[in-house]
Amino acid sequence: MITSMTACQQAKTENPLLQESDSPYNIPDFDMIQVSDYLPAFEAAIKDQRENIQKIVDCPDSATFENTILAFEESGRLLDRVSRIFFALIEADKTPELAEIEKKVQPMLTDLENEIMFNKALFERIKQVYDNQHDSLQGEDQKLLEETYKEFVRKGALLPDDKMARMKEINLRIADLQQQWGDMVPNATNDAVVWVNKKEDLAGLSEADIAQCAKDAENLGKKAPYAIVIVNTTQQAILTSLDNRELRKKVFEASVHRADGTGKYNTYPIVCEIAKLRAEQAEIMGYPNYASYSLEKTMAKTPENVYAFLKNLISQYAPKADAETKEIEAFARQTEGPAFNLEPYDRFYYSAKMKKQLLNVSEDEVKPYFNIDSVLINGVFYAANRAYGLTFKERKDIPLYHPDMKAYEVIDKDGKSKALFYTDYFRRPTKRGGAWMDGFQKQSRQWNQLPIIFNVCNSAKAPEGQPSLLTWDEVTTMFHEFGHALHGILSDCQYNRLSGTSVARDFVEMPSQFNESFASIPEVFDHYALHYKTGKPMPEDLKERMLKSINFQSAYALGENLAATCVDLAWHMLASKDIPTPEQADAFEAEALRQVGLLNNQIPPRYHTSYFNHVFGGGYAAGYYSYLWTEVLAVNVADVFAQRGALNPATGQDMRDKILSRGNTGDLMQMFSDFTGMEQPDASSLLRARGL
């Protein structure tokens, strides 16, 4: 069989996306790639995969693992490369030119996926291999066969023609709607910026934060001297310090209403149509709702199991949340008077003041010790070196898609090159909100391919010549996303389809949430929490107060996550006939939260429906619960590390061998059990770890 790259070489193309790079690792050559290269590259790569699929179908020999399953694994190799590069930029640096290309590319990709998934002749060969060779195959070969066969079945390969045709239509429409969502939500978030005319209105902010507001105003067209940008979550961290209550209210409401139709943008028509189409998909496949359909392939298995897990947490959390709110309001009334009523835009502000009074610690006091460069090199990388034996060498010879990026070669304990790791930490208007990990290339022994992994965040970049200082939340976000990166970097699998983070949603967040635990381990903390001017470590008394403050009034963080999780599930537990109209969407969300005891003005969902990108723009539909589910797994894993020595290389090697290197090559619960020695996760550890 002609491989994808050979086919392109035969075509003698000059498109850098379709050629083996001269650079190490076959890295994307961003110095050479032009915007005009993407569409022809997709056209060529799609043509290449079509031809490869046709060769499988036309093969005169009986279907075997080699001539069908391995051939199918190989068929989309070139398209995988082109897609990974293009969609990395769509997420992190989406220019208007790239957005126009995306509008053309998405229907092409959806057409191809439909064409492949509903190719009866191809599926018949896959089914023959599954029926005849499954039991004789072992290890990753058997797992690759299972995953390939089940993917076709779940997409509708066994459906009758009429239902198959409808599934194709649904797939195309959902892809189109998600593209609309991907355009609208970042635009809505950027448009929600709050303009400020007078510096005195920013009282309470540090000089560095005020300078950042001035810089943001400059970047966004300078309609006023200062701009407060809105981040992706409901609550805005800037409310912690902003003295001006009316401005706090304005910022909070700009966040909440960014895309609900009260202003320029309204995502509810997209939300309701996506939810209806997903419900119809599930019904065509024989499930009562999309949640039942989606959860079948996860660790949780059923909505009932997820709700049982959530109800247990809610019952323990609710009284603590109420007590926390009363404490903050009582504290605020000491200065604002007995008639003062705490509002959601007040909560962070008075909680921070209360924390300062009780624990004598504030963000402004600790931020000078969290220089982003030190957090990365002396914290994130240092922990990975101590636990897993990895070292990181910055590579300034590697082309990058944006000047803010950096690239590092990852070298294993045996001195051999293991991966490339890119960072892209600073926010910009062309980047979507949030933080994430992905890869330009996944690890695969079959393809003789080492991983090229990247982390993206949205921290503020300091003005030229000043250090970029982080909040504690941003510090833990860097550790979190690097946990995902390690899952990709340390992968040691035969097949691309199974490697790295190609695991169920309610397992994939475990390595990342576990990696957060390294941020507060004393030896690691002391190594990176260095004052940006003096280079001295954080004083012991401040460190003690700061670490003690991590779980101060932590009910909020759990509550906003629980609320968002229940909003997600509520939308995906509906039959298609019961999906609300766009005009009813707000009321539907509120009623869904009321029914589970989470309708709380003081603790709104981390994401309201209208900007819930994980669910309506990403791959977490009926799966946002996985952040809490995997946090349980992560706490259990962290307990094992603590028992054996948090930076014990033997424990790190055990984690590599039993979890991080294995991708989706085995049963995920068994992997967890093999490492922890536990038959089932211990959910009680979650509230303990959060200080509740």
Image: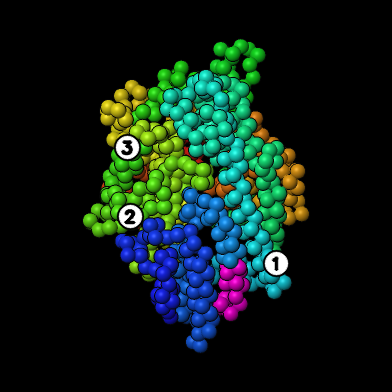
Tell me: 17 left or right of 569. Answer: left
Identify the residue shown where x is 59% and y is 25%.
Answer: 247
Q: Are marks 3 and 1 in contact (CB under 8 Å)?
A: no
The residue mark sitting in front, 2 or 1, is 2
- Can you tell which mark lies on residue 166? 1
- The magenta segment is 110-130
Identify the residue shown where x is 73% and y is 39%.
Answer: 587
Tell me: 449 left or right of 590. Answer: left
What amino acid does circle 3 point to?
Ser
Identify the residue shown where x is 51% and y is 43%.
Answer: 429
Q: Earlier in the sequence, mark 2 or mark 1?
A: 1
Q: Nearer the viewer, residue 312 or 57?
A: 57
Q: Nearer the viewer, residue 174 or 37?
A: 37
Give the labeled residue for mark 2: 398
Most frequent secondary structure within the magenta stretch: helix
Q: Quadrant of residue 609?
A: top right
What amino acid does circle 2 point to?
Ile
Look at the image and tell me whether residue 642 can be seen: no
Give the labeled residue for mark 3: 374
